[in-house]
Amino acid sequence: MVGEICNNQQISEKSSLIKLNPTLKDGLMIMQGRFGNQYNMPEHMRHPIILPKDSRITELIILKHHQSTAHSGPELTLRNVRLQFWVPGGRRQIRNALKFD
């Protein structure tokens, strides 16, 4: 079923997350995207973890990736974050996180 998460709970059809076709795996919400059948790609790239918007943990992950790329700009930071995670409103979240860096 589209949008089924756990315990027969479903994501509302009005939610912006419904487009990501999320499922739970090991207690984490992951995205079932178009790369699901690309078996030559690592698992974390085929099914990235969906991070909460406007969360401190999301901000810390963004800052870690920003620092690991020698304080690169927002586009390179976004690309590196998206190798493992999906942040709803990613560009805006990265710009907000980098304002305080």
Image: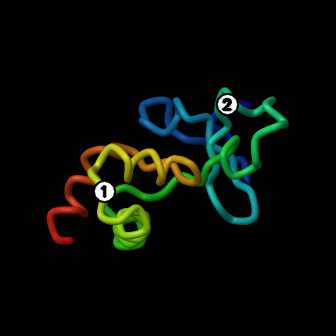
Extreme residue in the left direction: 99
Q: Amino acid at mark 2?
A: Val
Q: Is residue 72 left or right of residue 33?
A: left
Query: In the rendered image, which quarter is residue 29 located in?
Result: bottom right
Q: Secondary structure at mark 1?
A: loop
* Residue 60 marker: none
Q: Residues within 10 Å of mark 1 (few under 14, many from 20)?
A: few
Q: Is residue 8 left or right of residue 79?
A: right
Label 2 vs label 1: CA separation?
Answer: 37 Å
Q: Position of residue 74 (x, y in %)?
A: 28, 49
Q: Between residue 57 and residue 3, name the one nearer to us.
A: 57
What residue do we see at 42% from left, 31% from top?
14
Q: Between residue 47 and residue 9, name the one nearer to us.
A: 47
* Residue 72 marker: 1
- Quadrant showing the C terminus: bottom left
84 w.r.t. 38: above or below: below
Q: Position of residue 42 (x, y in %)?
A: 76, 48
Contact? badges 2 and 1 (CB < 8 Å): no
61 w.r.t. 34: above or below: below
Q: Earlier in the sequence, mark 2 or mark 1?
A: 2
Q: Position of residue 1 (x, y in %)?
A: 74, 31
What residue do we see at 84% from left, 36% from top?
39
Q: Between residue 21 and residue 36, name the one nearer to us.
A: 36
Q: Amino acid at mark 1?
A: Ser
Mark in the foreground, 2 or 1: 1
* Residue 2 marker: 2
29 w.r.t. 89: above or below: below
